Amino acid sequence: MPRFKPISTAPVKERAILVGVDLGNSEWTCEESLAELARLAETDGAEVVLTLTQRLDAPVPKTFIGKGKVEELCSYVRNLDADVVIFDDELTPSQQANLEKIVGEPVKIIDRTALILDIFGVHAKTHEGRLQVQLAQLQYVLPRLRGMWSHLVGEQTRGGIGSRFGQGESQLEVDRRLVRARISTLRRELERLDRRRGVQSKARWDSGVYRVALVGYTNAGKSTLLNRLTGSNVYVRDELFATLDPTTRALDLEEGRKVTITDTVGFIQKLPTMLVESFKSTLAEVRAADLVLLVADASDPHRELEIAAVRSVLADIGAADIRCVTVLNKCDLLNEDAKREALLAHPDAQPISALDGQGVRGLLYRIAQEAANGSVTLTALVPYDKGLLMKMVHERCQVMRERYVQDGLLATVKADARMAATLEPYRCDAEVASGEKAAENE
């Protein structure tokens, strides 16, 4: 028999109770929204032990849910030994404070926004990502600073020495000033990083490389698709918000044109406004794209609602007018009837499976088609001393025919408007090209 009993060091999952209110004003049913909240809670390491719902015309100002439901919640918290109560909608600071007082310590009362912020805090890896998450968290915390110095405020009511300085109120105000100062510092740092990103984005724009952005509901398979298209090894996991930081990889199309593909943070319904605001520099990658691939999980029963939520966020960040192609991922999980139904709902979509590669070749052809839209066909004779221009021809154009002649590279290409303007001084007509060919034959 061992002398000492081993103690497990594995983290103990917190026991969570979920609370949802059906207000009848959402396309998502209360049950569907709570099912997603449960996945969020599990992603954050909690174990959901109970789900409570209530039908209301409007939230109760004091406690969000009705008095009877609060009493029921307190009973469940005690009987199920719950550690945290998570509300599906955002609570006001006063509602959160009232619920904490009624339920009692040490049980935590949080809402969907706080849960998402916590998940983002765990998953943010880059310096910019951590700054963005910290900014959103502080913006959330600022109006909720309260009660930490209430013992000092209570001393004022007794009068006498030390009661004339307003310690509690002063300390609370100091805390608020510190948080506001930190928010200002974070904003300045993010603005600096945003300017740097703008320079990098402008460089890519000036290079003329066609830019593709992957957007979609969280866990739709964007990172898996990026890996499949570019041969990368971006972090992939079956969990919500596994990817927060944008990742850009180059892709050479079969026609010879080079494009860049950027994986972005996943979207979700009820995405906190402060997160959209703090991640605006990251989402700028979407606004700067030439083509948006809206990746959707074709096997998800909430597919249409998720696509609508993504389009709503695209509109919020000013990217609604960018050319967008819907990509129905995970089609390998559908039977033929379900796949046909999905394509009837989205006749212009590209059905694929990023996991096994099904339909990816067709998607690459679609990207090439989109990149070639607006292109003009021209023949140009690029002198040998214009080595950079030769490189640009191979990277930015679809080369239809080329050969090296006495004076340089003679190429017939499809080029976008900017590249066509660059090649204009070296442009030659078909007769010159035919003459060169005839001379070679002699």
Image (cartoon, helix red, strand yellow):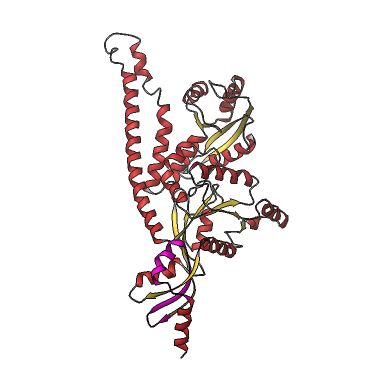
The image quarter containing residue 382 is bottom left
Q: Is residue 6 visible?
A: no
Q: Which residue occupies the extreme bottom position in the image?
A: 442
- List the single residue furthest toward the right: 337
Label total for image: 0
Whether 203 is drawn above or below 266: the answer is below
Q: Position of residue 286 (x, y in %)?
A: 47, 50
**Taking 59 as reference, is 196 above or below it?**
below
Q: Residue at x 35, y 39 (%)?
A: 187
Provide residue 21's location: percent of width, then percent of height: 60, 29
As for residue 408 lying within the magenta part, the answer is yes
Indicate the position of residue 285 as horizontal and vertical percent values.
44, 51
- Residue 336 in the magenta stretch? The answer is no
- Judge from the rendering whether residue 208 lies leftward or rightward of residue 237; answer left or right: left
Q: Is residue 147 visible?
A: yes
Q: Quadrant of residue 201?
A: bottom left
Magenta residues span 404-429
Along the viewing direction, whichever of 426 and 389 lies nearer the viewer? 426
Q: In terms of depth relative to the viewer, which is nearer, 230 or 374?
A: 374
Q: Position of residue 295 (x, y in %)?
A: 56, 52
Q: Which of 111 and 419 lies nearest the eye of the viewer?
A: 419
The answer to whether residue 195 is above or below residue 81 is: below
